[in-house]
Amino acid sequence: MKSTRRKRFEKEVLSHLDRLYGYAIHLTRNGEDASDLVQDTYLNALRSEKQYSLGTNAGAWLFTIMRNTFLNKLRKSSRKPVGMAGEWIEQMAREDVAELKKMGPDPGMKFLDDLLQEDIVNAIESLPDEFREAVVLCDVQGFSYADIAEILEIPIGTVRSRIHRGRLILRNLLAEWKNIAMGGS
Amino acid sequence: MTCEDAHLHMHDYLSGELGAEYRKPLMDHLDACPNCRKFFLQTQQMQTFVRNAMSVAAPSELQSAVQSILANA
């Protein structure tokens, strides 16, 4: 017979299954590996159940476990994550401010209308890890800066900066792709 | 508010993190500055597209596997 605490624990952790799967796809970039990672995450969460206080932040707790589980697997398999941002990325973020100053006054609501969902996923996937993770945790998963800082184990100021710059880079990538798709130079 | 300040604040706004005291000054700036308003609307549209494109549901086999892990623990 399960205890009341146990039943509540299961309910709280199960409610994050879809989000965890989305994050796992994002980390592993592969549906099969993502399913394995989700199951490993739940097994590790069960092992650490006593560290979790019911009714607190199950989402951030589970995402932290998932990320650590993924990084441990990565270390063991000696597979390397995608590289960190280079100078070109920094340049792209800086160019955005220059571009803004040249913009005309139209409302700009059709910015992404001609892009496909696949283009957007590809653009996200092409971001360097540090920006991609922060943008996904904020804009897809809806975590606060404080939660993202906990999950990624970085200061809140760094989270904020990575989200801002990640969005700028993503925006420029999509604008460039759209320009190519529309036959522009 | 300068355009550079507006940029910083609009990202925080889109993240749901902008303090209440900055919201009105930001909205006033966006009303008055077409370039910043365009940038804001585009970034907001991109955020919605990204959220929709990246949101997935766990496959039913995975749901069953996770329920089984929890049930057998």
Image (cartoon, helix red, strand yellow):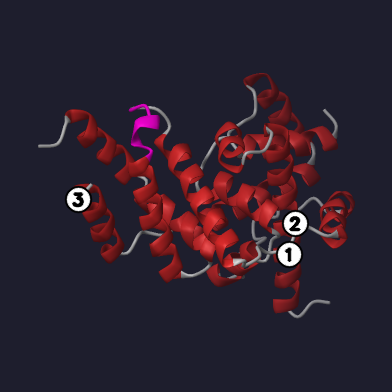
Per the image, is B47 magenta?
Answer: no
Residue A107 visible in image: no
| Neighbour tally class for label 1: few under 14, some 14-19, many 20 plus, Cα within 10 Å | some
A26 up-or-down from A60: above or below? below
Disc 3 packing (10 Å; few <14; some 14–19; many ≥20): few
Q: Which of A113 and A74 is in front in this view?
A: A74
Q: In which quarter of the image is residue A84?
A: bottom right
Q: Which residue is most to the front?
A: A76
Q: In this view, does B31 lie to the left or right of A77?
A: right
> Residue placed at 65% from the left, 63% from the top?
A81
- In this figure, which residue is indicated by the disc labeled 2? A169
Foreground mark, 3 or 1, reads 3
Q: Where is residue A25 in the image (x, y as percent from the top left)?
A: 48, 62
Instruction: Please report contact status of discs 1 and 2: CB closer than 8 Å, yes or no.
Output: yes
Residue A89 seen in this snapshot:
yes
Q: Is mark 3 on a helix, strand or loop?
A: loop
Residue at disc 1, secondary structure: helix
- In the rendering, which numbered label is found on residue A139? none
Instruction: Give the residue at the far bottom of this rendering.
Output: A183
Dot 2: element = helix
Question: Over which residues does the magenta segment extend?
Answer: A48-54
> What residue did someone put label 1 on?
A173
What residue would you read off at disc 3?
Answer: B72
The answer to whether the residue labelled 3 contacts the one labelled 2, judged by CB atoms less than 8 Å apart, is no
The residue located at (43%, 59%) in the rendering is A37
